[in-house]
Image: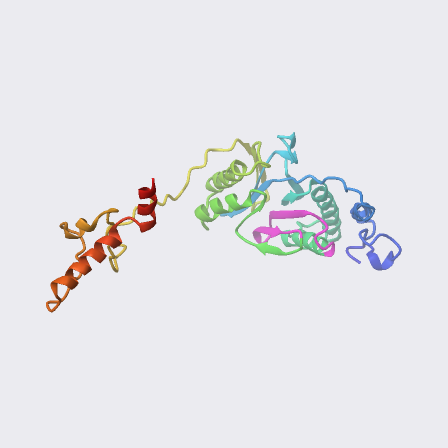
């Protein structure tokens, strides 16, 4: 049992991808498998992309996301809000399949409301929402394509969780998910600090999402920010992406003397008929015969050396034949 929901053990005769009336059905997986076995082509799946970030600052937490909904090469909307409310003090942003993310959010919101009523209508801790989501994702073993950033404030302060589709969770002061998360993470790592003010954190979140939008074709629109403070006040901000300038520039200008010369080797290049080049200044001097060598042997040495620098014999015969 999971929060009162029956599992496969109670329904052995049903689809192995359908774990009770929990809001998720995976019957299309069996349909696609049967289509492949019959030699048919399964329906084409469309890839979606997004960029979401989360930042903890001195006094609360900020969740930011872009606002473009795309399905393959078709843009469905440029003003969609991807940050959802789980409780009045807990908010989340998802990356992945839109239907899976929406079903996961609706189920978690209902479970959190039941938990709030069962505990005397107190503020639900942020870790409780993260635990419900990660257990559900781990239970379905990556069949739910949804990565979530969960942030909020409770009696113990501001918290931020990064939960992926396999159920793994990271607790970090800043996080980024989606198709443009690599560029966003580079902005966050270079500019985040523990004593960030709310204004600086909003600017950092906006720049991180804007950098992801600029380097990802599936992200676009405007930047939506949700600011959750430790006094349980919430503020929504919609901003246009700013021009992100690089924070560090590395000029490739090595100083003189950084690379030492270990050895030098000079190879002289002689012309085709360059026997005379041996005697030119700067040319390499061939070792001459010893003092005890006769004149005839010295002449043979010179003729042999000059003939080796002459053109090949085959070319001379060919030219003479013409």
Number of marks in picture? 0
Q: Position of residue 125 (x, y in %)?
A: 64, 52
Q: Position of residue 155 (x, y in %)?
A: 60, 52
Residue positioned most to the right: 13
Residue at 73% from the left image edge and 56% from the top image edge: 139
Q: Is residue 152 magenta?
A: yes
Closer to the camera in the image, 102 or 284: 284
In the displayed structure, 37 sits above or below 203; it is below
Image side of residue 241 versus residue 97, left or right: left
Closer to the camera in the image, 275 or 48: 275
Residue positioned most to the left: 291
Which segment is the magenta one? 139-165
Q: Position of residue 310 (x, y in %)?
A: 26, 50
In the displayed structure, 207 sits above or below 293; it is above
Image side of residue 98 versus residue 236, left or right: right
Residue at 32% from the left image edge and 47% from the top image edge: 317
Q: Looking at the rendering, in which quadrant would you find the C terminus?
A: top left
Residue positioned most to the bottom: 292
Residue positioned most to the front: 321
Q: How is the image coloured?
A: rainbow
Closer to the camera in the image, 298 or 183: 298
In the displayed structure, 46 sits above or below 164; it is above
Q: Looking at the rendering, in which quadrant would you find the N terminus?
A: bottom right
Q: Quadrant of residue 44?
A: top right
Q: Position of residue 296 (x, y in %)?
A: 14, 62
Residue at 45% from the left image edge and 49% from the top image edge: 193
Image side of residue 308 versus residue 213, left or right: left
Q: Is residue 98 visible?
A: yes
Q: Is residue 286 visible?
A: no
Q: Is residue 253 magenta?
A: no
């Amino acid at each position: 049992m999971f929060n009162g929901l029956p599992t496969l053990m109670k329904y052995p005769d049903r689809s192995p991808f359908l774990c009770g009336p929990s809001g998720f059905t995976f019957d299309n997986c069996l349909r696609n498998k049967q289509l492949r076995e019959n030699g048919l082509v399964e329906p084409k799946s469309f890839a979606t992309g997004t960029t979401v970030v989360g930042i903890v600052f001195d006094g609360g937490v900020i969740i930011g996301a872009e606002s473009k909904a795309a399905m393959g090469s078709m843009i469905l909307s440029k003003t969609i809000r991807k940050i959802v409310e789980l409780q009045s003090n807990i908010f989340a942003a998802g990356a992945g399949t839109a239907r899976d993310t929406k079903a996961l959010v609706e189920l978690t919101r209902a479970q959190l409301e039941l938990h709030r009523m069962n505990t005397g209508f107190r503020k639900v801790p942020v870790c409780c929402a993260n635990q419900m989501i990660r257990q559900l994702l781990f239970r379905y073993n990556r069949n739910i394509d949804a990565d979530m950033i969960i942030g909020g404030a409770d009696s113990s302060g501001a918290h931020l969780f990064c939960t992926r589709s396999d159920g793994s969770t990271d607790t970090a002061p800043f996080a980024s998910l989606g198709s443009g998360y690599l560029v966003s993470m580079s902005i966050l790592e270079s500019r985040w600090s523990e004593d960030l003010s709310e204004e600086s954190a909003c600017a950092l979140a906006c720049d991180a999402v804007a950098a992801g939008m600029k380097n990802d074709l599936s992200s676009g629109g405007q930047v939506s920010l949700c600011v959750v403070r430790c006094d349980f006040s919430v503020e929504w901000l919609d901003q246009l992406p700013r021009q992100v300038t690089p924070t560090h520039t590395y000029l490739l200008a090595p100083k003189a003397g950084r690379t030492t010369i270990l050895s030098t080797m000079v190879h002289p290049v002689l012309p085709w008929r360059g026997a005379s080049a041996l005697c030119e200044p700067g040319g390499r001097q061939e070792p001459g015969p010893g003092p005890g060598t006769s004149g005839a042997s010295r002449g043979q040495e010179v003729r042999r050396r000059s003939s080796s620098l002459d053109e090949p014999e085959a070319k001379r015969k060919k030219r003479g034949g013409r």
